[in-house]
Amino acid sequence: MASTTRQFARVALRTTTRRTAFVAAPRQILRQGGRRYNSSEAGKSGGSSSLIWIAGAAAAGGAGYYFFTQGGSSPSIKEFKPTQKDYQEVYNVIAGRLEENDEYDDGSYGPVLLRLAWHASGTYDKETGTGGSNGATMRFAPESEHAANAGLKAARDFLEPVKQKFPWISYSDLWILGGVCAIQEMLGPEIPYRPGRTDGDLSACTPDGRLPDAAQGPKHIRDIFYRMGFNDQEIVALCGAHALGRCHKNRSGFDGPWTFSPTVLTNDFYRLLLDEKWQWRKWDGPAQYEDKKTKSLMMLPTDMALVQDKEFRKWVELYAKDNDAFFKDFSAAVVKLFELGVPFAQDAKRFTLKSPNA
Ligand code: HEM
């Protein structure tokens, strides 16, 4: 029943994407199906209120978390090993906060959470093994001040209360879990999650210039993504994330959303790229495209490069006509992206977390 509702929401939204009006956040449609998140459930989850958490700074790798219990006459300190259930509780709280904080942007923090997870991961360099989602070094300047990361404080601040509630989770695992949750809550595919990241210090910050520059073309896109270890198909699949969210003048300088349903993941980014006529926008901002018909959508030069380059274009054409193929390839590429640079323990397993709204 619940998955039927989600399916219905997706179909309903997909059929509206040719309209010129924006589609509201998915929760409003989902709510009609009775899938409202019950915030009292979140209160049951953390369990940290009755415990005193102690960071295991001296533990091997600095990753350990311990808790101090006062049950009965003999207080004790125990090592805390989070299980899938514990990560599910964190997921539920993030999903609840997404639902509650619907005043932001187009009605959801989901897009900016995904952008945080991507920018934390996309600094990876396969030659040196530096960067990637391990470390959460964007907590520190200068990385937090890199132009590419403008505006991501909103996402980091959104997740801070979650970190306070679950102090045992590293920032780096939390930011990636935020990305996983955002994709799934915006009706995207399942993104299997594997925890095991530890937080780094200032010295692990990556140099500026590792993330893509939207003003450039295919060669630059390949230079950046090949450095992370991706191929052309994976690059195009990942860029389908631009079905979500928008550009902000006060962040990147660019302006506007890519699709009419910026809080629901669909293959509309590819469909619009191919079906609409795009022209340069005449304005005093950086060079970007607008759709000729409504002038309300935008494309970056790097987005347009995906249809101008023959090799990229064949994947755009596939994903434009096959949403299932897009979802399958997007999920696989995102899992790879989110795990770049993480030295997982041998027994670390992926698992799928479920929406509390499903
Ligand atoms: C060539 C590659 C890419 C370039 C040049 C690029 C560039 C940009 C720019 C300029 C923005 C606007 C930021 C703002 O003003 O708020 C943006 C937003 C966004 N990007 Fe990308 N991006 C790329 C790839 C990706 C990938 C691989 C993902 C995820 C897998 C992604 C996810 C997003 C999302 C979700 C937003 C919306 C954020 C919001 O609404 O606040 N992007 N991107």
Image: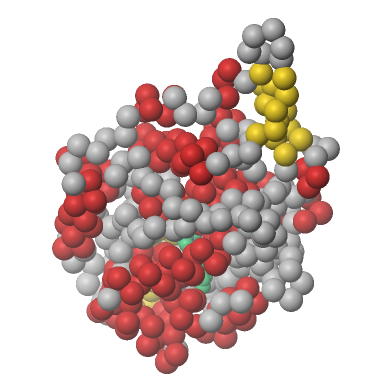
* Of 155 and 334, the residue lying toward us: 334
* Of 73 and 320, the residue lying toward us: 73
Q: Identify the residue at image location x=27%, y=76%.
A: 322
Image check: 219 left or right of 130?
left
- Is any atom of residue 214 visible in this view? yes
Percent across and percent down for residue 138 are 66, 51
Residue farthest along the bottom direction in this orientation: 310
Percent across and percent down for residue 354 are 38, 47
Percent across and percent down for residue 270 are 33, 75
Image check: 291 left or right of 20?
right
* Of 185 and 253, the residue lying toward us: 185
**253 is higher (above) or lower (below) than 112:** below
**53 is higher (above) or lower (below) than 169:** above
Q: Identify the residue at image location x=69%, y=21%.
A: 68
Q: Identify the residue at image location x=38%, y=77%.
A: 280
Percent across and percent down for residue 127 are 74, 76
Question: According to the image, what is the colour scheme of the structure?
Answer: secondary structure
* Of 254 and 345, the residue lying toward us: 345
